Amino acid sequence: MRLILLGAPGAGKGTQAELICESLNIPAISTGNILREAIRNETAMGKMAKELIESGELVPDDTIVSIIKERLSENDCANGFILDGVPRTVTQAEALDKLGVQIDKVVAIEVKDEDIIRRLSGRRVCSACGASYHLQYKPSREPESCDRCSGKLIVRKDDEPKTIVERLNTYHEQTEPLVDFYRQHDKLIVIEGQEEVKDTTNLLFTALGIKI
Ligand code: AMP
């Protein structure tokens, strides 16, 4: 299955992408994770992206297109993939088309802005491996350390309140038009993001015909 997950930051795309990835054994590809890793490794791309990410803006389309082109050419994508957080602009979606990337379905996870703000303020990420947790919905076993690697859990710089509002504005202006774009391409499924992760998973897997 070749799938795109659309939705505001904090709608649950990353969490659901991981669950689909485990269930179907296809990779979940997050441009946000790739960029954060580049920032941790202090690469040229990381240095360019850092300020944009921290201020809630998007990284330029040509950078994203070259990341995704390279990642999709890897062997593990041969039987399908889940794109989490990409495309984020109509230009990126058109670039995927031009690259000949076939998409089967696009799922938009809808969550109200006020719920997004509440959710993002409870998010914690591992400073070492990038794993994501939530104080209420997906707590780590130890309050401040990662279940996977014991790294220290921190608040992402772009999950700070001022930046959350910026990111939501960016989402509405630049990414939401993709909902209509994929509706016109007959690929769109819309689900309402639920309070509980497992309830969203139920809706999503049912919509995609995946057995739970
Ligand atoms: P995410 O983890 O998906 O919320 O991404 C974190 C940040 O990385 C975003 O707020 C953007 O600044 C940047 N980013 C990730 N994916 C993209 C994309 N497809 N296009 C532009 N910027 C992106």
Image (cartoon, grey):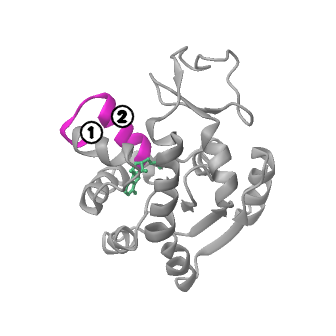
Q: Is residue 80 visible?
A: no
Q: CA distance from mark 1 to mark 2?
A: 8 Å
Residue 61 image point, x, y percent: 29, 62
Q: Is residue 102 above or below residue 85?
A: below
The amino acid sitting under disc 2 is Glu
Q: Is residue 191 visible?
A: yes
Q: Earlier in the sequence, mark 1 or mark 2?
A: 2
Where disc 2 sits, the SS reads helix
Highlighted range, magenta: 31-46
Residue 165 image point, x, y percent: 52, 54
Rendered image: mark on residue 37? 2
**In-front residue for pair 124/94:** 124
Q: Chief secondary structure of the magenta span?
A: helix
Residue 170 image point, x, y percent: 45, 62
Residue 92 image point, x, y percent: 36, 67
- Left or right side of 107 for 169: left
Quarter of the picture containing the N terminus is bottom right
Residue corresponding to mark 1: 46
**In-front residue for pair 212/192:** 192
Q: Is residue 131 above or below residue 210?
A: above
Q: Residue reaching furthest front?
A: 162
Q: Residue reaching furthest left?
A: 44
